[in-house]
Image: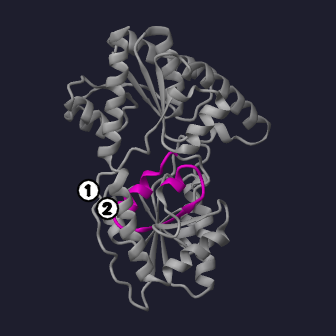
């Protein structure tokens, strides 16, 4: 939305092609024309892929956009094929993390990974195509492993955060007999690390730490990696977590929390929830994984731990649980990190500069 608004304000006419289950009125009220796409995020059905590419092609042929901007891996692949068929306009592919596709394990995962690599190499090397990545690990992977030319890959660190909405606030004091609130905001997929957080919570309580663990978010029904609601209810019934479900008042969630955590072993871009938590002045504990490590200056704004390691996660959390002054200092430094180069303003300026660069290049041809 920040990029779409900025493009609109810069004089672009903006169309948004997306699933239309939610937020249509909000999009239209912003002055964007919504083009419905029946989209399934994780479907690998070849027939459905053909239909989805055909629908995007039909949109491109009808509206003849001067530039297209695809968000996430699957729209970038399908949209690039559609653009190849129907357009000569510049294509910007925004890979918000490489997801599970490039990290599949076993024989099926290896086949999928090789197919994705081959298709990506074919599509993302084209003359009028640019690929935005959110972290240096993904940039190096595309250049060194996939073979995308260096000039065709641009690093823009995440989608940014609005520092006025996610404003800094001091952590509310926690007295000796109160619980310290640890919060995870995320889609509830297994690779995001909720199970590891539950286990870390058990270890913390065994060591005498009074902690309250909150999960904010919902399982993604379109994903085979979603945590079943039955399992979430089991954790709640056992007193191990509080599950708050989907929430729109995320700044308020962070005001009532002491520590932000995301034990992800998913191939993230830059996790927005961690950007928002740091902007609100919360110390962050996350994994030493691509994307996640971009948000943390280790020992300064939070801690990085090994992925899938509940013991290491518990140890890092325990340091913060027992040291409120360290939490506050890390929160202050995290806010400074966000203000320095991770706000929406930084991202919008870099993206619009890219738009104008490609449009000028097309005009010169």
* Residue 153 picture location, percent across and down: 51, 31
Residues shaded magenta: 269-294
Q: Which residue is drawn at 29% across and 40% down?
A: 2
What residue do we see at 59% from left, 49% from top? 266
- Residue for point 54% across, 85% down: 209
Q: In which quarter of the image is residue 273?
A: bottom left
Residue drawn 43% across and 40% down?
A: 156
The reply to whether callout 2 and callout 1 are in contact (CB within 8 Å) is yes
The correct choice, above or below, for 267 with respect to 11 in the image is: below
- Relative vertical location of residue 58 with respect to residue 125 in this rendering, above or below: above
The circle drawn on residue 331 is none
User: How far across and down, in percent of the image, does residue 69 sit?
Assistant: 40, 26
Q: Where is residue 298 in the image (x, y as percent from the top left)?
A: 53, 65
User: Which mark is on residue 165?
Assistant: 1
Q: Which of marks 2 and 1 is nearer the N terminus?
A: 1
| Quadrant of image for the N terminus | top left
Helix or strand or loop: what does disc 2 sit on?
A: helix
Disc tally is 2
Q: What element carries label 1?
A: loop
User: Compared to 138, does 13 lie above or below?
Assistant: above
Tell me the distance, in whole angstroms, between the alpha carbons under discs 2 and 1. Answer: 7 Å
Residue 292 belongs to the span the image colors magenta: yes
Q: Name the residue under label 2.
A: 251
What is the residue that sits farthest to the bottom in this orientation?
Answer: 176
Is 17 inside the magenta-drawn segment?
no
- Give the camera-side residue of 31 and 287: 287
Q: With 271 as the anchor, is 230 left or right in this view?
A: right
- Name the quadrant of the C terminus: top left
- Is residue 267 visible to us here? yes
- Tell me the quarter of the picture where residue 363 sits: top left
């Amino acid at each position: 939305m920040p990029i779409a608004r900025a493009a609109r304000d810069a004089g672009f006419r903006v169309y948004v092609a997306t699933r239309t289950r939610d937020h249509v009125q909000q999009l239209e009220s912003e002055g964007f024309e919504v083009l419905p796409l029946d989209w399934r995020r994780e479907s690998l059905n070849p027939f459905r892929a053909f239909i989805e590419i055909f629908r995007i092609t039909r949109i491109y042929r009808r509206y003849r956009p001067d530039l297209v901007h695809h968000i996430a891996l699957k729209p970038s692949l399908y949209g690039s094929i559609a653009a190849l068929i129907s357009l000569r306009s510049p294509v910007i592919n925004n890979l918000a993390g490489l997801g599970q596709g490039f990290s599949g394990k076993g024989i099926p995962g290896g086949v999928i990974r090789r197919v994705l690599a081959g298709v990506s190499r074919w599509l993302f090397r084209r003359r009028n195509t640019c690929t935005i990545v959110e972290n240096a690990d993904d940039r190096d992977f595309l250049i060194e492993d996939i073979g995308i030319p260096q000039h065709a890959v641009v690093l823009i660190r995440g989608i940014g955060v609005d520092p006025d909405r996610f404003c800094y606030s001091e952590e509310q004091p926690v007295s000796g007999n109160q619980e310290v609130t640890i919060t995870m905001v995320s889609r509830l997929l297994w690779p995001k690390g909720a199970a590891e957080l539950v286990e870390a919570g058990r270890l913390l309580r065994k060591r005498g730490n009074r902690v309250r663990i909150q999960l904010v978010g919902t399982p993604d029904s379109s994903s085979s990696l979603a945590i079943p609601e039955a399992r979430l209810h089991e954790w709640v019934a056992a007193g191990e977590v509080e599950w708050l479900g989907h929430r729109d008042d995320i700044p308020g969630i962070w005001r009532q929390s002491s520590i932000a955590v995301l034990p992800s072993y998913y191939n993230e871009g830059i996790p927005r929830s961690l950007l928002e938590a740091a902007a609100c002045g919360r110390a962050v504990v996350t994994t030493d994984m691509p994307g996640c490590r971009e948000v943390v200056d280790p020992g300064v704004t939070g801690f990085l731990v090994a992925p899938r390691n509940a013991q290491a996660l518990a140890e890092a959390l325990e340091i913060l649980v027992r040291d409120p002054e360290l939490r506050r200092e890390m929160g202050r430094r995290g806010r400074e990190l966000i203000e320095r180069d991770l706000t929406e303003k930084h991202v919008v300026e870099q993206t619009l500069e890219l738009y104008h660069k490609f449009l000028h290049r097309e005009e010169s041809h």
